[in-house]
Amino acid sequence: MTQADHAPYRPLRLGRTQEFLKQIVYGGNDGIVTTFAVVAGFAGAHADGVAQIGAVAVLVFGMANLLADAVSMGLGEFLSGRAQRDLYGAQKARRIAAIRHDPAEARARLAGLLRGRGLSPTDADSAAAIITRTPDMTAEMLMRYENGMGHPDQDNPAINGLFTFLSFVVFGIVPLVPYFLLPAEPPTFVLSIGATICALGALGLLRWNATGLGLGRSVGETMLVGGVCAVVAYVVGMVVGAGA
């Protein structure tokens, strides 16, 4: 028996970016698009000569929208995480009770699921017989394979909400940066477009760095989704401005 056979098991840990990738991408993309929607909406109205919007007004509306939505997103992520935990706990308790009431039925269902995932009938029956000795583990496996419900204990709703909030603010403030420095004129809006494109590109690169898959897809999808939303916001601003 080698030394490796006695080595303790060490779970593979994800980096911070990988661990909170969902929150970073979700919050960051929403922050960029939401803030640029305000800027683009004002610019669209201004382009039609209806509203003479100053940089201070853009910043007031942009920052108010940014912070309000960031708080809403962060708290929404927190509440949804708590709700998911509560749902998982309630479902698991019911599953465990059902397994203890009829272990043979649970064993047969688990064996069928294992066969469906590639185990031979003999191996599936053997594995199911062993696993169903532990109702807790059986309940988790049935919930994973039958309902797609992963164990939420590794997720911290408060930390997830914080990452969503911070990502929303950090990425969402980028489209406003030119208006901190320059008056609200057409060249400033062009700079805001450039800043938005850079922010979407950076978010796509962050996504690619965390997953290691598809540079073109990671960056392209992120920029495409953000670009579509930005164009819609600008067009709506023009239409509303023309009708005012």
Image: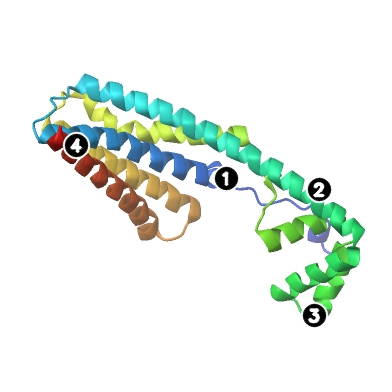
- Compared with 234, 129 (above or below) is below
**How many C-alpha atoms fall within 10 Å of the one at disc 1: few (<14), some, or many (≥20)?**
some
Mark 2 falls on what kind of element? helix
Which numbered circle lies on residue 93?
2
Which numbered circle lies on residue 19?
1
In 3D space, how far apart are the residues under numbered discs 3 and 1 (Cα atoms)?
A: 36 Å
Q: Nearer the viewer, residue 11 or 122?
A: 122
Q: Quadrant of residue 41?
A: top left
Q: Position of residue 68 (x, y in %)?
A: 42, 26
Which numbered circle lies on residue 240?
4
Q: Position of residue 79 (x, y in %)?
A: 59, 35
Of the numbered discs 4 and 2, the one sitting upstream in the chain is 2
Mark 3 falls on what kind of element? helix
In this rendering, position of residue 75 left or right of residue 173: right
Which numbered circle lies on residue 27?
none
* Quadrant including the C terminus: top left
In 3D space, how far apart are the residues under numbered discs 4 and 2 (Cα atoms)?
A: 53 Å
In 3D space, how far apart are the residues under numbered discs 3 and 2 (Cα atoms)?
A: 29 Å
Which tag is nearer the camera, tag 3 or tag 2? 2
Q: Which residue is mark 3?
A: 121
